[in-house]
Amino acid sequence: MHLQKTALVLEGGGMRGMFSAGVFEAFLAHQLTFPYITAVSAGACNILSYMSAQPLRTRQIIEHYVTDKRYFSVRNWIKSGSIFGFDFIFKELPKQLLPFDYAAYRSYPGI
C-alpha cells in the first residue's frame, strides 16, 4: 500500500538505527511505501535497505560490520582524519560484502 499523504522522517544516531530496522522490516512485510522520505546521518544509511527491498540488510550491517575496525576506529582517524572508514562503508560493504540492490532502490515507488 502506497501511503499517499504520509512522509517518513528518520533521525540519525548511529546504533539507534537498530530500533528502526525492525520497523522497516514491518514496512517491507506489509508492502508499505511512502511518497516522501527524509533522513539524516545513520537514518539515511538505514532507510536505504528498506527502499531497496532488502530484508534484514540494516540488521546485518549493524550486527556484523559496525564493530569492524574498517568501519569505525581510531586507526581510521589517524589514517584519514575521520573515525569512519568511508571506503569500507561506501565501497567494500555495498559492492562486495553485502551487495546493495541499486536497481530495486531506483524502482522504489516513492520519491
Image: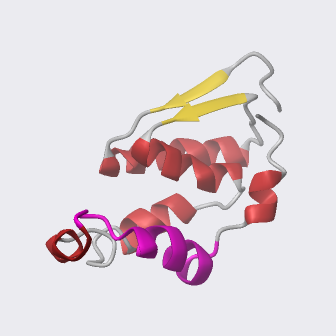
Whether residue 13 sits left or right of residue 22 in the image: it is left
Is 104 placed above or below 38 here?
below
Which region shows up in magenta?
Answer: 81-99
Residue 87 x, y percent position in the rendering: 44, 74
Identify which residue is drawn at 80% across, 53% down: 106
- Along the line of sight, the residue nearer the viewer: 83 or 4: 83
State yes or no: residue 83 in magenta. yes
* Number of numbered discs: 0
Q: Main secondary structure of the magenta part?
A: helix
In the visual, does 6 lie left or right of 75?
right
**Quadrant location of residue 64?**
bottom left
Residue at 42% over, 34% down: 11
Residue drawn at x 81%, y 63% is: 103
User: Which residue is situated farthest in the bottom direction here?
Assistant: 96
> Would residue 75 be found to the left or right of residue 48 on screen?
left
Residue 5 in the image: above or below residue 100: above
Judging depth in this view, the residue of 96 and 63 nearest the camera is 96
Is 3 rendered above or below residue 82?
above
Is residue 105 highlighted in magenta?
no
- The answer to whether residue 107 is above or below residue 99 is above
Horizontal and vertical percent position of residue 43:
46, 43
User: Colour scheme in the image?
Assistant: secondary structure
Q: Position of residue 2 (x, y in %)?
A: 82, 30
Residue 100 location (% of width, % of height)? 65, 68
Q: Quadrant of the C terminus?
A: top right
Residue farthest toward the top in the current orientation of the protein: 5
**Residue sitting at 32 percent across and 42 percent down?**
13
Q: Quadrant of the N terminus?
A: top right
Q: Nearer the viewer, residue 11 or 33?
A: 11
